[in-house]
Image (cartoon, rainbow, N blue to C red):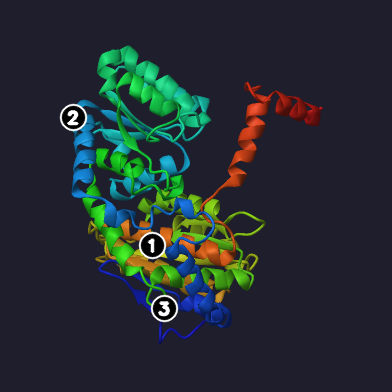
């Protein structure tokens, strides 16, 4: 195991600390060799001179969001909160994962099991799958209940959310009446064109714009993410402020820029044979944050036959399933651990006179103290077992820290993609399944493709 007496830590403003020492041990020579390339990749991103530069509106997004914009989003959210027991966020990929990540991280772990309270609706998600049971069961839940819809789609024709919105819109208009339903539907879509923009204009829905220069997986700090997060009752001003601080922190290249250091370290590991990055958390509230992260990096880097495969685990839960493979499986992996320094709630372990479970030695300790020792013990075991480890510590799980973490990963993703030699801001491979699906469903305009795919299946 490496000597940690001189840990290389990158401290950022107020909330986040990055430690790469237990990864540097495995690829220090490559990391040093990549310094100039990392600085150049940062420069390409900041100068907007690289591939995909028409989708870089997210770079200065946090600092550009005005108090008036936040106030308008909060006003819309308040209207929905006052009139709904449930607010359904309809979207797929980046159109729902960011909001889901933040809402899950900041909400009570068992919030779904409590009944909706006045002015505190449950935020649900639809259009992120084509599950017939899921859709039917959601309809059943919403039947006879007050609900609203936030429909998020640039075009309005993406299959999964289009199906869900058609069904939920029909139910809402049936229950509330067509006129009242107009005030309970908000469309987040293109500024001028597309099916959803046309429908919103015709029906008189309140609308928000998805910026043309912000791709879906980078859109959580636009109304795409901010409106559902506000509907869940979270402080979007603090979320944006945290992101703006990280934007400032990562404005310059070099060893003091945590986003560049992370991007450089993960590429150094990739170039020395580590092909899979596992995002690890020891707090179950971060499960969907990892899902957001997987889309961000998978869709940005997985192209041209290249890319670090993004995976995730929830520890200590997955130590009892994936732990064996990580400890002793193929040595092509590395870990990035997100650690929360201070939980919001204190709960200590009681003493038991019989001590049949043998854990009286833990009596009086906080549960989190045990968790932190599990985290440390796991890191030692995995590093000893040949798994490089990076660690990102946040002070606590709140809006400010999550805003910083979101922007940190976004900025690092852009730098990392350019180091990898790909366009981090397109996703041409996503269209392949759609073309096949449309051909199989005999969508108008796909006659030739239908004929070709049927011949292939004979």
Q: Earlier in the sequence, mark 3 or mark 2?
A: 2
Q: Which residue is mark 1?
A: 408
State the residue at coordinates (22%, 48%): 235
Q: Quadrant of residue 198?
A: top left
Q: Position of residue 321 (x, y in %)?
A: 54, 55
Q: CA distance from mark 2 to mark 1?
A: 34 Å
Q: Position of residue 50 (x, y in %)?
A: 52, 60
Instruction: Tell me if residue 20 can be seen.
Output: yes
Q: Which residue is mark 3?
A: 255
Q: Quick one: SS at disc 1?
A: helix
Asked if 387 appears above or below 296 in the picture, the reply is below
In the rendered structure, the answer to whether residue 360 lies left or right of residue 153 reads left
Q: Quadrant of the C terminus?
A: top right
Q: Position of residue 140 (x, y in %)?
A: 39, 20
Check contact, mark 1 vs mark 3: CB within 8 A: no
Q: Which residue is mark 2?
A: 82
Q: Quadrant of residue 77?
A: top left
Q: Which of 51 and 291 lies nearest the eye of the viewer?
A: 51
Discs 2/1, front? 1
For disc 1, the neighbor class at 10 Å (few under 14, some 14 to 19, many from 20) is many
Asked if 37 appears above or below 282 in the picture, the reply is below
Q: Quadrant of residue 165?
A: top left
């Amino acid at each position: 195991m490496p000597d940690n007496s001189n840990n290389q830590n990158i401290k950022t403003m107020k909330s986040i600390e990055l430690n790469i020492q237990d990864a540097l041990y495995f690829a220090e020579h490559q990391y040093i060799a990549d310094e100039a390339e990392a600085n150049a990749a940062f420069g390409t991103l900041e100068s907007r001179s690289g591939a995909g530069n028409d989708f870089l509106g997210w770079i200065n997004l946090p600092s550009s969001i005005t108090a008036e914009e936040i106030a308008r989003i909060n006003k819309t959210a308040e209207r929905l909160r006052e009139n709904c027991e449930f607010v359904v966020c309809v979207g797929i990929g980046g159109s729902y994962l960011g909001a889901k990540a933040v809402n899950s991280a900041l909400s009570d772990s068992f919030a779904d099991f409590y009944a909706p309270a006045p002015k505190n609706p449950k935020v649900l998600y639809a259009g992120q799958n084509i599950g017939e049971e899921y859709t039917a069961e959601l309809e059943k839940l919403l039947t006879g209940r007050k609900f609203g819809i936030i429909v998020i789609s640039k075009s309005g024709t993406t299959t999964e959310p289009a199906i869900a919105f058609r069904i939920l819109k029909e139910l809402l208009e049936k229950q509330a009446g067509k006129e009242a339903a107009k005030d309970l539907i908000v469309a987040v879509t293109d500024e001028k064109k597309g099916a959803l923009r046309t429908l919103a204009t015709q029906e008189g829905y309140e609308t928000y714009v998805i910026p043309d220069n912000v791709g879906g997986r980078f859109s959580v700090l636009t109304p795409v993410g901010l409106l559902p997060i506000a509907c869940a009752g979270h402080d979007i001003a603090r979320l944006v402020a945290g992101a703006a601080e990280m934007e400032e922190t990562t404005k310059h290249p070099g060893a003091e820029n945590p986003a560049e250091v992370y991007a450089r370290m993960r590429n150094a590991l990739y170039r020395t044979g580590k092909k899979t990055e596992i995002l690890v958390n020891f707090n179950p509230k971060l499960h969907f944050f990892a899902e957001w992260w997987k889309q961000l990096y998978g869709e940005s880097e997985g192209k041209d036959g290249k890319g670090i495969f993004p995976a995730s685990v929830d520890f200590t839960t997955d130590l009892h399933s994936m732990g064996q493979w990580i400890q002793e499986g193929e040595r092509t992996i590395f870990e990035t651990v997100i650690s929360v320094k201070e939980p919001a709630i204190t709960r200590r372990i009681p003493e038991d006179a019989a001590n049949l479970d043998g854990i009286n030695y833990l009596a009086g300790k906080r549960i989190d103290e045990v968790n932190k020792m599990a985290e440390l013990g796991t890191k030692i075991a995995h590093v000893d077992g040949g798994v490089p480890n990076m660690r990102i510590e946040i002070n606590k799980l709140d809006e400010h820290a999550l805003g910083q973490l979101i922007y940190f990963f976004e900025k690092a993703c852009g730098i990392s993609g350019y180091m990898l030699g790909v366009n981090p801001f397109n996703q041409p491979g996503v269209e392949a399944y759609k073309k096949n699906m449309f051909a199989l469903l005999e969508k108008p305009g796909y006659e030739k493709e239908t004929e070709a795919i049927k011949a292939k299946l004979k």
